[in-house]
Amino acid sequence: MNKYIFVILLTIIFVAYPGNIMAADKSGSCGDNATWTLNETGKLVVSGTGKINKRSWNKYKKQINTVIINEGITGICENAFYGTNMSKISLPTSLTSMDEGCFGNTKLRSVTVPEGITRIEDWTFYDCAYLKFINLPDSVTYIGQYAIRQCYSLEQIVLPRSLEHLGDWAFARDYVLEKVVFTGNIVSEDYDLYYDITGPITIYYPADNATWHDRDENINENIIWKAYNDISEIGLESEEDAGDFNIVDGTLLTYHGEGGLVIIPDSVDKIGTRAFEKCLALTSVTIPSNVSVVGKYAFNGCTNLEEINFSEGLETISVCAFNKCSKLKTLDLPDSLCNIGEKAFQKCTGLTGVKFGSKLDYLGDAVFDGCTELKDIDLRHTPRYVGGKAFGGKTAVDRTFINNLNTKKKSSGCVYDYELFLLNKDKLYTVNDSVAAVFFVKTDNPTGSNIYFDFSSGEWDHCYVPAFNSLSNFSDGAIHLDESMVFLMVQLVIMM
C-alpha cells in the first residue's frame, strides 16, 4: 500500500509542479482563431486560421530563433516579428498578406515568399542584415518603399515577371548587392529608387522585352545596365551553392549552418560583426591562421560554445566578440594577439583560466568583467594598457593581481620600457631587469618635484631633479623622464 501512495504522490508533484521537472512552453492567442507556442529551444509555432493580428509574444522576442507558421494562417500583422532573433521561418501556402515591417530587423538568412502574396509592403524586410537569399513568387506585383533596404548580406535579387512597381529606396543601402535581375517589363519607379546606391551594381533586363528599350541609363553612375537572353547567363548563386558561410571579400558576414563543431574556411581573413551572434547550436569553433580580426559581437550570446581553437595570425578580438559565452572553460590565446576589445569575454561565467600570448598590447575595459569562476591567469607579457574592470565584476582573480594591473591613461603617467612599466599610485610593476632606477614626475606636483624608485632597495624616495627636455640614460643606470614627455609619449622603448 505504501508503494502505491508513493507513486500517487510523485504523480501529484509532477502535475502540480511541472517546472521542477521540465521547462514549460510559453503560449498565447495571436488572432481571432490563431494561437502560438514557444518552446525552450526558441521555436515559435503559430497554428489556427485567419490572420495573425497581434504580436502577443513580444516580451519573448529575443528568445525566438525559428518561426513555423502552419497552414490555415492567411495574414501577418504589421511588425509581427520585428526585432526578434528569428533566423529561420517557414511560411504556409495559405498566406495571402504580409503587413508593413513584419520581418524587419530580424536575423533571417533566407526566406521563400509563397505564391498568393501580391504585395511586399513598405519596410517588410528592412534592416535584415543577415538576409542572403529572398525568393519572390511571380504573383508579386508591388514592392514598397524601404522593403528590402539595409539587407547588407543580400548579393543578388531576382524580381518576378509580374512586378509592376518598385518604391522609394526599395533596395538601396544594400552594400554588397551586386545583381538585380528583372524578368518582366520595365516597372514604374518612385523618384528615389536608386538614390543612394554606391555600387557598382549591375541591373539585368531581358533583351527581347521592348519595354526596356527607352530606359534611362543616367539615373546613377554606379549602375551598369546589361541585357540578357537567358537568365542562366547571369551566373546566379543558389542557396545550395552558398554552403554554411556567407563570405564577401574575405570577410565572413554570416553563418547559417547547423552548428556543432565548426571550422571556418581558410579563405576568411576577418570574422565580421555579429557573424555567429546567438548561434545557440554552436559548440566548438576553429579559427584559421588567415583570420586577423574577430569582429564586434561576432560570437555574442553563443551560450553553448565550449571550445575556441585560435591560430597564430589573429591580432584583434573586438568589442563584445565572445560576450556571454557562458560554457567556455579555458582560453589559450595566440602569441600574435595584440588587442582585446572592451567586454570581449564579459559574463563568460564558466571561464576558469586564460593563457595570454607574448605580444598583448591592449586589454580593454571590462574584458573579463563578470567571469565569476576565473582564477587562473597566465600573463606572460604586461600590456601597454589594461582597462578598468578588465578582471573586475566578481571575478575570482586575486585582488592583488587586479590592483597591480589597474593602469591609468597615458596622460596620468605610464612609463614605458621595452616590456612596460605599470604605475599604480605608489607601486611600479613589471620592470626590465636592466633598469636600475626611474625618476618619474608626478603630474599633480610642481615640475621638478619627483619620485625616485631604487630597484636595488625596492623603495620609493623623494628628491629634486631639474625638468629635462629629453630622456637621458645616466651612468648610475637611472632613467629620468620629464613631465612634458609623460603627456606626449605614446610609447617609449628603452633599449639598454
Image (cartoon, rainbow, N blue to C red):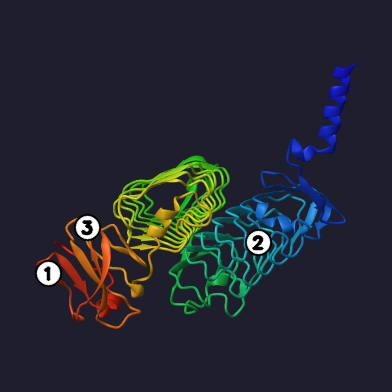
Q: Is residue 36 visible to us here?
A: no
In the image, residue 313 sits, relative to residue 484, either above or below, namely above
Q: Residue at x 55, y 67 (%)?
A: 150
Mark 3 Cα-neighbour bin, 10 Å: few <14, some 14–19, many ≥20: some
396 vs 219, nearest the viewer:
396
391 vs 119, nearest the viewer:
391
Q: Is residue 33 visible to us here?
A: yes
Which badge, 3 or 1, is on the more N-terminal residue?
Answer: 3
Report the residue marked by disc 3: 432
Q: What amino acid type should be assigned to the residue bearing mark 3? A: Asn
Label number found at residue 270: none
Label number found at residue 474: 1
Report the residue marked by disc 2: 83
Which badge, 2 or 1, is on the more N-terminal residue?
Answer: 2
Q: Which residue is drawn at 75% across and 35% down?
A: 21
Quick one: quadrant of the C terminus? bottom left
